[in-house]
Image (cartoon, rainbow, N blue to C red):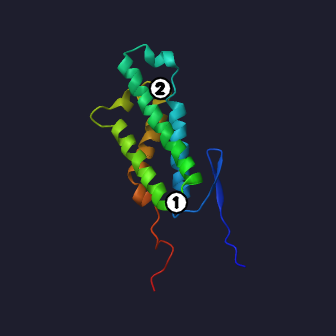
């Protein structure tokens, strides 16, 4: 009997089986950077609510989308039945992420510029944005990537 060895890795304290044709190193980087950005931008309730209510709502919206994004990566890797379903869910969160960081509204700018470590926040954000918007080339592996031309 020929048993296939399944590789595993720990991403944000969860043991994940590497069962899809994706770049797990980059996906792990994305989840960890999103978690770090979420921690970096944490401001106690009173810190954001001192201003306008709409500013606080924008802050909560950004953080909720960011949290759902990296949490969903883990949940989807644990429970989705196929790469198609994982990809569709990832792309749906990409749409939400891009709606929240809308370059006309710029909600995230005040959030990053007022956190304790704005430079770190911007570096994390820039990498996260790049990876999310380049999912097809950075994370999703082609079916023929490991084959040689015959």
**In the structure shown, which secondary structural element does the residue marked by tag 2 occupy?**
loop
Left/right of residue 111 with respect to residue 35 in the rendered view: left
Eye-nearest disc, 2 or 1? 1
Q: Residue furthest front?
A: 81
Residue receiving disc 1 = 23
Residue receiving disc 2 = 115
Above or below: residue 79 compared with residue 22: above
Locate residue 143, reporting x and y percent: 46, 71
Q: CA distance from mark 2 to mark 1?
A: 31 Å
Above or below: residue 13 compared with residue 143: above
Residue 2, located in which quarter of the rendered image? bottom right
**Who comes first in sequence, dot 2 or dot 1?**
1
Q: Residue furthest right?
A: 1
- Is the Cβ of the residue at disc 2 closer than 8 Å to that at disc 1? no
Locate residue 102, reporting x and y percent: 31, 37
Q: Pick the residue in front: 112 or 132.
A: 132
Residue 142, located in which quarter of the rendered image? bottom left
Q: Can residue 21 be seen from the camera position used here?
A: yes
Q: Residue furthest bottom?
A: 150
Locate residue 124, reporting x and y percent: 47, 40
Q: How many numbered marks are there?
A: 2
Locate residue 68, reporting x and y percent: 49, 39
**In the structure shown, which secondary structural element does the residue marked by tag 1 occupy?**
loop
Within 10 Å of disc 1 (Cα), the crowding (few <14, some 14-19, many 20+) is some
Q: Residue at x 52, y 27 (%)?
A: 42
């Amino acid at each position: 009997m020929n048993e296939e060895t399944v590789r595993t890795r720990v991403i944000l304290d969860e043991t994940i089986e590497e069962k899809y044709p994706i770049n797990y190193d980059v996906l792990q980087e994305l989840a960890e950077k999103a978690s770090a950005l979420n921690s970096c931008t944490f401001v106690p309730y009173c810190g954001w609510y001192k201003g306008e209510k709409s500013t606080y709502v924008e802050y909560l919206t950004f953080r909720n989308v960011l949290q759902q994004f990296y949490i969903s990566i883990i949940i989807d890797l644990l429970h989705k039945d196929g790469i198609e379903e994982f990809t569709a869910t990832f792309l749906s969160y990409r749409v939400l992420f891009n709606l929240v960081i809308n370059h006309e509204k710029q909600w995230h700018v005040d959030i990053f510029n007022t956190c304790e470590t704005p430079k770190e926040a911007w570096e994390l954000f820039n990498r996260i944005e790049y990876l999310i918007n380049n999912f097809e080339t950075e994370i999703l592996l082609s079916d023929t990537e490991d084959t040689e031309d015959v």
